[in-house]
Amino acid sequence: MSKNKHSKSSKRWLDEHHSDHYVAKAKKDGFRSRAAYKLLELQEKDRLFNQGMTVVDLGAAPGGWSQVLTECVGSQGKVFALDILEMDPLPEVTFIQGDFTEDESYQALMQLTAGESIDWVISDMSPNMSGNRNTDQAGSMYLVELALDFADSVLKSHGNFLAKVFQGEGFDAFVKKIQQQFQKVVIRKPDASRARSREVYVIGFNKR
C-alpha cells in the first residue's frame, strides 16, 4: 500500500474516531475504550458472565473489557489479563505485559492461571494492521487460533470462549473448529462494532 493510501486510511480512522458516539460515551462513562460497549452489548444479549467467575482477557489494553469484567464477576471473581502493550492497573485485575505469540509470555500466563477454574477465555486481540488484507487476515487468524489453543488447555469442563474474528480466509474453518469443541456457538456483530469493519465475535458455550 502506498504512503498516500496509508495517510488517507489514517485520516478516515481519525475522523471516525473523533466523531464516534461510542468514543464520547466511553469518556463520559469512565471506560478506557469504546470496546467496552461491545462486551456490554454481548453481556446483555447472551448473559455471558456471572458473579464469582474467573476470566482470562487476552488483548486487554487499555482495559475497557477488563473494566466490564470486574463489574460482572464481582469481588468473588477473578480477572487475568494480558497484552503486548502497557495497561494502567485496575483493581481486581492481574495483568501480564507480554506478546501472546511468544512462548515466554504464553507460559507465564499458563503458570499464572495454573490451578484456577477458568470459566471464560476471551480475546479482543488484533495484529498490527499493515493495510494488506491477506496479510492482516492471516495475522488475525493466527492470533485467534492461538487463543483457542490456550482456551482448550485451561478452560474447565463446560467452560466458554469468546473471540473477535475477522471475516475472510480461514473464518469458516475456524467456526467449524469451535463448533467441534463447544456445544453451542453463536456469532454476533455488536452495534458498537463499526459497520465497515469485518470483525465479528464468535462465542463458544460449554466446552465439550
Image (cartoon, rainbow, N blue to C red):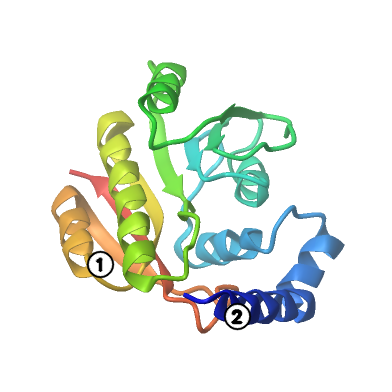
- Residue 60 horizontal side relative to residue 63, left or right: left
Q: Residue at x 34, y 63 (%)?
A: 135
Which residue appears farthest toward the right when viewing the image?
Answer: 28
Separation (CA) of disc 1 from disc 2:
30 Å
Number of residue marks = 2
The three-letter code of the residue at mark 2 reads Asn
The three-letter code of the residue at mark 1 reads Phe
Q: Are marks 1 and 2 in contact (CB under 8 Å)?
A: no
Q: Of residues 178 and 108, which is closer to you in this image?
A: 108
Q: Is residue 27 above or below residue 92?
A: below
Q: Earlier in the sequence, mark 1 or mark 2?
A: 2
Task: Find disc 2 in the rendering and name its residue.
Answer: 4
Task: Find disc 1 in the rendering and name its residue.
Answer: 171
Q: Quadrant of residue 163?
A: bottom left
**Secondary structure of the residue carrying numbered label 2:** helix
Q: Is residue 196 above or below residue 161?
A: below
Residue 9 percent location from the top left of the image: 60, 78
Classify mark 1: residues with Cα within 10 Å, few (<14), some (14-19) or many (20+).
some
**Secondary structure of the residue carrying numbered label 1:** helix
Quick one: quadrant of the C terminus? top left
- Residue 179 horizontal side relative to residue 131, left or right: left
